Amino acid sequence: MLSQLGDDAKLLAGGQSLIPLMKLRFANPAHLIDLNFIAGTSYIHNANSALRFGPLTRHAEIENSDIPARIPILYDCAAGIADVQVRNRGTIGGSLAEADPSGDWAVVLSTLATQVRCLGKNGERTVHLKDFIQDAYTTALAHDELVSEVVVDIPAKGSGGAYLAFKRAAPVYPTASAAVQLTMDGNVCKDAAIALGCVGLTAIKAKDAEAALRGRPISERTLSAVAEAARAAADPQSDMRGSADYKRTLVGALVRRAITIAVRRARGEHVEVSHLYA
Ligand SMILES: Cc1cc2nc3c(=O)[nH]c(=O)nc-3n(C[C@H](O)[C@H](O)[C@H](O)COP(=O)(O)OP(=O)(O)OC[C@H]3O[C@@H](n4cnc5c(N)ncnc54)[C@H](O)[C@@H]3O)c2cc1C
């Protein structure tokens, strides 16, 4: 239908980004193709060391599945998105396809090995998440392609992660956020992935911060160096949510806290967290 109807057609998933944009007249598609009528597009499968999410899998389904026990950072993300109404409708596929700079999924999934399967008239292809989101509101999808599955590798044993966002209220996007996924060997961090949200046009992979953590013992000195590198990696804009300086400081503090929680989870501790509210 996408290729038949051309550029004037848009896919409708949960409608939690598209419908508000249509109400504001920022989007005005001539045709809506409702994916909700396609059976079998909402699922979470666990097979071959990977989790496979159907494109129409709602945030609430992920929040309420038993997946969090395996990868708690996914629970942090799903459970922290807006409010119950948005989580009951919004989908993981729609969130990645929208590529909103403030969206949570892209930040969290970029700390995990994530691939996006894209289906079009000419077949299916697999795109790494880092290549899928190209800019704010811009993805590698062709007009006649859709996200058909999101595949996330299950992290190695001894891994833990945490996602923390700072928000003014639950049903709004974060002011800044930080996702940390690491693998521990005793007190030494063997591997680390750190991503920052809402402080750039896309999720920012804080590579210098990751390097400051990898191979180091978890100490006050390491945490300070990682937080400093995260602050330097951020590229925020001043807006109604805060000044650029404020957001930079915030993101350093969030990274520091997220590491502390991720380390405890990597050691097998059950740690419940929620986002922080102003
Ligand atoms: C009040 C409010 C607060 C919110 N707060 C947050 C928040 O804090 N954090 C957060 O991450 N999100 C937030 N959201 C957004 C929410 O998570 C959306 O669910 C998500 O961004 C889009 O998913 P959707 O399924 O609703 O997509 P839709 O709105 O249906 O579609 C979004 C776009 O993606 C396209 N699309 C949808 N599915 C596919 C597919 N399978 N393949 C290709 N293209 C597709 C559509 O054509 C459209 O262009 C909020 C939304 C609202 C209304």
Image: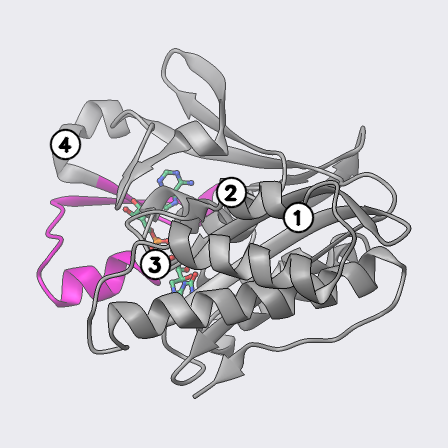
Task: Give the labeled residue for mark 1.
Answer: 213
Packing grade of label 3 (10 A; few <14, some 14-19, many >=20) is many
Task: Give the labeled residue for mark 4.
Answer: 7
Q: Amino acid at mark 4?
A: Asp
Task: Give the labeled residue for mark 3.
Answer: 199
Which quadrant of the rendered structure holds the C terminus?
bottom left
Measured Cα–Cα span from mark 3 to mark 4? 31 Å
Where disc 1 sits, the SS reads helix
Q: Amino acid at mark 3?
A: Val
Which quadrant of the rendered structure holds the N terminus?
top left
Measured Cα–Cα span from mark 2 to mark 1? 9 Å
Disc marking residue 208: 2
Q: Earlier in the sequence, mark 2 or mark 4?
A: 4
> At which x and y percent is residue 273?
68, 76
The number of numbered badges drawn on the structure is 4
Measured Cα–Cα span from mark 1 to mark 3? 21 Å
Disc marking residue 60: none
Q: For disc 4, does the CB lie below 8 Å from ligand 1?
A: no
| Residue drawn at (90%, 60%) of the image | 268
Which corner quadrant of the figure contains ligand 1?
A: bottom left
